[in-house]
DNA sequence: ATTGCCACGGAATTTAATACGGCCATTATG
DNA sequence: CATAATGGCCGTATTAAATTCCGTGGCAAT
């Protein structure tokens, strides 16, 4: 990512660190990424082009990874949320992990520090489908035990959105219980 | 939500159920909500206005709850992800829950069917901050024990996005490990 | 068979995104 | 200490996309 100027190779400037205005911008875009640059600038105290410039920089630097629509699970008929705790003693990681991550029911996969377990967040149509998924997981090489927690009700779910504001205003689409 | 026509009150039409094209649209928008209606229509086989009409309907019906930017946790200096499993025997629910949901570190709160525990997903700057949060949680009335799993590495994290396609193409912004 | 109802497509209009040039403040440099 | 350079901002102009309007055709109910 170098660019040539005057026959001399110069590095691209180091990404500046996030300031207060950037945090405000992130807070707005987490809540609603469809706002126009005019309104965004209005809310954070900038002109539309300046706000646009900031957002472009945040995208380039990777602070904004992308923009996604938030789907109501009920609308697509997968209302059963569960956390699955699987013991993976001696798991060879990548290959089996890849298989599991292809299951459409699996939304998250985490490994745990100082432990041999993994934590999955899964969503299925009903308990029968959940049982089927658990059976498939149990048959996966490397998995020695599974334990699942079926979520009864969810009061808060604001994914992948750490501390962009000091006191967190819950995003509009997260403000009511999901189930 | 009724509207008057010819002096007669009519209910708004019942929301049609999601068809194959709607699922395709949802799949695209989950992956990247910044696509133009021209490209969206191109991908699902519709004209731009038709695609626009579909998306408007999906928003009205609530299937699309909103659109959010995905932020890199490292960029905002909260790289430590953990799951906290708290025993809440005799919890009175709403009031204490409200307090906990105000903590900016807490991203999700779930109650578990057939159990007296709750599952939290939290994100902090470092282990010291996590310990502080756990202490605060332990002091909360109704909490009798806490257990936390610090996430070492995350291989997949596609939040709140159940089964909009058959074989799930991992969204672009989720395709590489988060930590 | 006929009528009414949606959903789609094409064209036109409105609105927003993006590019450009000049200004000011802050910072490096002689 | 003065001066040049840099970077970020604003106002304006241009380009592109969103949105509206209206005619058409398929489908279903009557």
Image (tube, coloured by chain):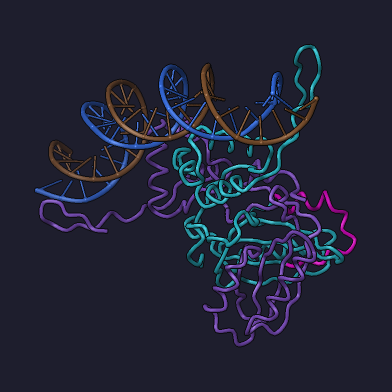
Chain colours: A purple, B cyan, C blue, D brown
**x, y (%) of residue D11?**
34, 22
Q: Residue at x 74, y 61 (%)?
A: B137
- The outermost residue toward the top is B7
Of residues B81 and B173, the one nearer the viewer is B173
Magenta span has B145? no
Q: Which quadrant holds the N terminus of chain B? A: top right
Q: Is residue B135 left or right of residue B41?
A: right
Q: Residue at x 55, y 44 (%)?
A: A27
**x, y (%) of residue A20?**
48, 44
Q: Residue at x 37, y 52 (%)?
A: A16
Q: Residue at x 56, y 62 (%)?
A: B125
**x, y (%) of residue B144?**
83, 67
**x, y (%) of residue D16?**
36, 34
Of residues A115 and D15, the one nearer the viewer is D15
Q: Does any portion of residue A167 appear in the rendered image?
A: yes
Magenta span has B95? yes
Q: Which residues are magenta?
A: B85-102
């Amino acid at each position: 990512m170098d660019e040539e100027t005057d026959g001399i190779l110069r590095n691209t400037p180091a990404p500046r660190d996030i300031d207060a205005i950037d945090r405000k911008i992130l807070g707005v875009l987490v809540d609603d990424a469809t706002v126009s640059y005019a309104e965004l600038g209005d809310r954070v105290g900038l002109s539309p082009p300046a706000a646009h410039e900031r957002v472009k920089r945040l995208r380039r630097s990777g602070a904004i990874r992308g923009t996604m629509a938030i789907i109501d699970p009920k609308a697509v008929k997968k209302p059963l949320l569960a956390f699955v705790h699987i013991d993976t003693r001696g798991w060879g990681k990548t290959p089996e992990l890849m298989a599991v991550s292809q299951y459409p029911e699996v939304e998250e996969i985490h490994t745990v520090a100082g432990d041999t377990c993994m934590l999955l967040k899964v969503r299925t149509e009903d308990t029968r489908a959940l049982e089927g998924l658990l059976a498939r997981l149990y048959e996966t090489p490397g998995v020695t035990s599974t334990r699942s927690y079926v979520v009864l009700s969810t009061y808060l779910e604001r994914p992948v959105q750490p501390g962009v504001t000091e006191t967190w205003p819950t995003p509009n689409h997260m403000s009511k219980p999901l189930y």
